């Protein structure tokens, strides 16, 4: 299946909106999960996220979005299905489907930047649309987490996800995976409405009281229109190639991210050297392109056109992803 239209209107977005499959109208967006660019005319899946306190659409490759999905036993009984927000709560231990936007940090940590929670049967129609997109190899029977359910519960979950009638069958209840106590204390538990769960989303780090001069507090300079692509770190360049190795194929996205981060940290300086040099070349490329780009002094985009600091080059550029 191939989507025929893109979403140009970003007004009225809500994190309760179902993920959308659209065709990219430009080649300026990149996948939130793998970091690769999404070409003009390619299918992409959008989920509503937050950037600088504003709701905006974030994009993923359809295959990455499908790999991010997970079915699990509900850890509490306080979440509602995003497809039935006035319906009954999902009981503790009942199977639930998570549709997630995952990102991997430079340190290899995989985090959920946004997610929606569904009862498997209520998600069947949506799931059929997402998994039928060209290039998606995931099926209802291979969604992440199924193999962690009790054996007698897996077929019920697959039947529900594939849209079969399960109304006469009892909803199975299993034992939820144990979450780290410290993480649970920080998160404050699940949200009751909207099919979202605060416990699974990362909390922003505490900000220092000292504010840099010359920039509004809490604001990032907007990227100038047409500005060159940011500098790729050594880890990012290495990870894009290493991720293709066969040893990561049987791992879930989260497991692969942790394995990549651990392997990178274990590499010697000599092994990292080619990627460090590649990053330096990319920095030089960025400097050349920025010099050619050179917005007029004093223009609104002049500050945004300055070469990135070493710290900034390691940060994700959310502005590109909103396109």
Image: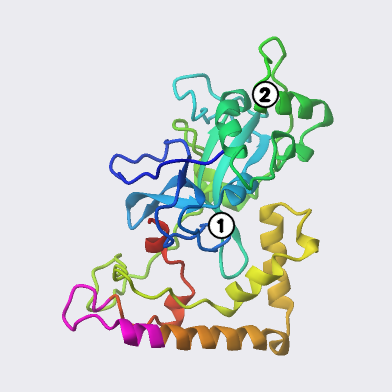
Spatial CA span between label 1 and label 2? 27 Å
Q: Is residue 308 left or right of residue 83?
A: left
| Residue 111 location (% of width, % of height) | 57, 55
From which residue to which does the magenta span run? 288-303
Is residue 105 left or right of 167 when viewed as pictured? left
Along the viewing direction, whichever of 238 and 314 lies nearer the viewer: 238
| Residue at the image position 66 percent from the left and 61 percent from the top | 257
Q: Can residue 44 be seen from the camera position used here?
A: yes
Asked if residue 302 lies in the magenta stretch, the reply is yes
Badge 1 is on which residue? 33
Disc 2: which residue: 160
Quadrant holding the N terminus: top right
Queried whether the magenta region covers residue 47, the answer comes back as: no
**Residue 105's spot in the image, x, y percent?**
56, 65
N-terminal label among 1 and 2: 1
Secondary structure under tag 2 reads helix
Where on the picture, by quarter, is residue 273?
A: bottom right
Residue 83 vertical placement versus 99 (above, below): above
Q: Residue at x 40, y 88 (%)?
A: 288
Which class describes the residues within 10 Å of circle 1: few (<14), some (14-19), or many (20+)? many
């Amino acid at each position: 299946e191939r989507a025929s239209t893109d979403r140009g209107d970003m007004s009225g977005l809500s994190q309760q909106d179902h993920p959308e499959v659209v065709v990219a109208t430009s080649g300026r967006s990149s996948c939130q999960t793998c970091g690769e660019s999404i070409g003009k005319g390619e299918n992409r899946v959008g989920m509503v996220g937050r950037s600088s306190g504003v709701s905006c659409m974030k994009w993923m490759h359809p295959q990455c979005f499908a790999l991010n999905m997970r079915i699990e036993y509900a850890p509490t009984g306080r979440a509602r299905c995003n497809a039935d927000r006035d319906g009954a709560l999902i009981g503790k231990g009942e199977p639930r489907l998570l549709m997630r936007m995952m990102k991997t940090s430079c340190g290899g940590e995989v985090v959920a930047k946004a997610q929606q929670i569904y009862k498997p049967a209520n998600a069947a129609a949506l799931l059929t649309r997402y998994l039928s997109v060209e290039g998606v190899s995931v099926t209802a029977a291979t969604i992440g987490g199924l193999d962690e359910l009790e054996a007698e519960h897996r077929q019920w979950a697959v039947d529900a996800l594939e849209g079969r009638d399960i109304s006469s069958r009892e909803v199975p209840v299993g034992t939820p995976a144990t979450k780290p106590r410290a993480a649970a204390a920080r998160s404050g538990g699940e949200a009751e409405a909207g099919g979202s769960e605060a416990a699974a989303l990362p909390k922003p780090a505490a900000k220092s009281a000292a504010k840099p001069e010359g920039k509004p507090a809490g604001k990032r300079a907007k990227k100038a229109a047409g500005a060159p692509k940011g500098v790729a770190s050594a880890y990012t360049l290495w990870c894009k190639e290493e991720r293709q190795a066969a040893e990561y194929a049987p791992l879930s996205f989260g497991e692969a991210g942790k394995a990549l981060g651990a392997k990178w940290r274990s590499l010697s300086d000599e092994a990292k050297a080619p990627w460090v040099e590649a990053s330096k070349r990319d920095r030089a490329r960025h400097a050349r392109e920025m010099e050619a780009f050179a917005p007029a002094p004093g223009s609104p985009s002049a500050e945004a056109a300055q070469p990135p600091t070493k710290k900034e080059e390691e940060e994700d550029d959310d502005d590109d992803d909103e396109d």
